[in-house]
Image (cartoon, rainbow, N blue to C red):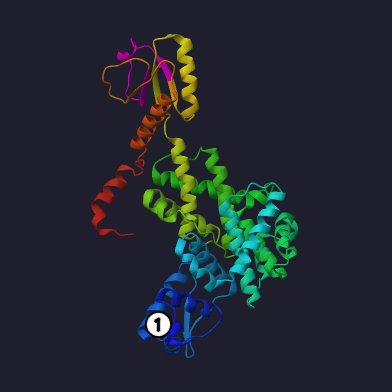
Amino acid sequence: MNENQKPNSKNRKYLILARLFNNEHLSYQRLADDYFVSRSSIANDIAFIKELIAKDNVALNFDNSGTYVGSDEIAKQKVIKRLVIDFMNGGRAKQYIPILIQTDVIEPIRKTVIATTDAWQLQISDSYVTDIVVSTSVLVSRGRSGFHINLDLHNQLGTLLLSLDKYPLIYELLKSVENAQIYEFSQDELRYLSYVVLGGGFRYFVPDTSIPETFKRDTQRLIRNVSHGINIDLEHDNQLREDLTLHLFQMALRLKFDTTVVNPLLGEIKRDYPTVFGVVWYALIDFANNNGLVVSDDEVAFVTIHFQAAIERSKRQRRILFVCLNGIGTSSLISAKMRQILPEVSLIEIISRAALPRQNLSNVDLIISTVSLPVQVVPVVQISPMITNEDMKSIMSQYIDVVTTKNRQPNILNSSSARTISMLRENIFF
């Protein structure tokens, strides 16, 4: 490389990372000479790389020959996979992908995976397809360059009792990549990818497999702990229990084999639901310790989504009054049309204008009327007796305003917690 060909600062950081992952030992002076920059610039690059890979519990080591990565190939591929998915979601950041993997494998693998799952009529999410494609692309790219995964089969199979012959769909999916003459996997590579695929899509490939009762009890204990922390009883939410048990079992499979799933909503979840995220994070410590896991923020955010959905389900029904003067037939027709556009959780009651002044409106969210009404303490939408498309738009618009105004974060702190936080708020930092 001559000075006119030297990369910019950002490119240089990922070039150095790629060299480290290719088992090079690199001294600051050698890197400074290679890229025509100062040693202080290289020191900043190494600090950036150190922080970047620490997210996946990978560390830089140092000896007399320079800086190197001492982690195994699985850990390195975990970092590369996370970075590639981040770059894919980052617009201009896609330019860094070719530094880390051979991009010519991505599209053929994607087409093969989609064709295979379509042939099986599996309804798989786009994010999960991307996870399979990137995991496979990273492994294939690294394998082509001579960097292969080696598994300790005795320890891993002894832990989770997994084997390829139990999951023929997964095996066939991966063999379809071989059949497309993209890459020939070793048995270790096939087995490792089967864990990755299974860990992200347990429900797609092995829907009839039973989850151990001990694991179910741990999940129920987690729900109890979070319920106590947010001061909302979610223990009787069957959907939460079933969805969370399945999700946590998938998560355990991923983490046992040191694979990861990037959560693109992590930043938004931390910002929009900080208290729920914090309570879930704390409750997961006990769950993780019982199951020998180390849980990342990405995984905490996924679990937070399940609990936030349960919180939304626990909220009371929204009550809507419909005031109509033209008889039960007309009112029933309009009510039926309203139910087409309003969520099923909404409770629509029909009353007369004469009865309205005697109605308790404390638990009413919206009034819809075909006649003019005096000013009320809750929002009113006046519509025509024949309810036009414009009327339906007005109802939906007002309903959205009601929901967004009242749909604030619940008060999930008990009184003692609130008092404690109020006293310590200025001195506590997370």
Residue drawn 45% across and 14% down?
331
Residue type pointed to by label 1: Ile
- Report if residue 159 is visible in the image: no
In reply to whether residue 290 is colored magenta, the answer given is: no
Total label count? 1
Q: In terms of depth relative to the viewer, which is nearer, 230 or 320?
A: 320
108 horizontally vs 245: left or right = right
Residue drawn 47% across and 41% down?
310
95 to 24, vertically: above or below = above
Which portion, as a residue range, is magenta? 349-369
Q: In terms of depth relative to the viewer, which is nearer, 227 or 258?
A: 258
Q: SS for tag 1? A: helix
- Report if residue 281 is visible in the image: yes
Residue drawn 69% across and 46% down?
121
In reply to whether residue 359 is colored magenta, the answer given is: yes
The image position of residue 401, as x and y in percent, is 35, 34
Residue drawn 42% across and 9% down?
326
Q: Which quarter of the figure is the C terminus placed in?
A: bottom left
The image position of residue 108, as x and y in percent, is 65, 62
384 horizontally vs 165: left or right = left
The image position of residue 339, as x and y in percent, is 48, 25
The image position of residue 12, as x and y in percent, is 44, 78
241 to 331, vertically: above or below = below
Mark 1 sits on what residue?
A: 42
Which quarter of the picture shows residue 166?
bottom right
Dot 1 surroundings within 10 Å: few (below 14), some, or many (20 or more)?
Answer: many
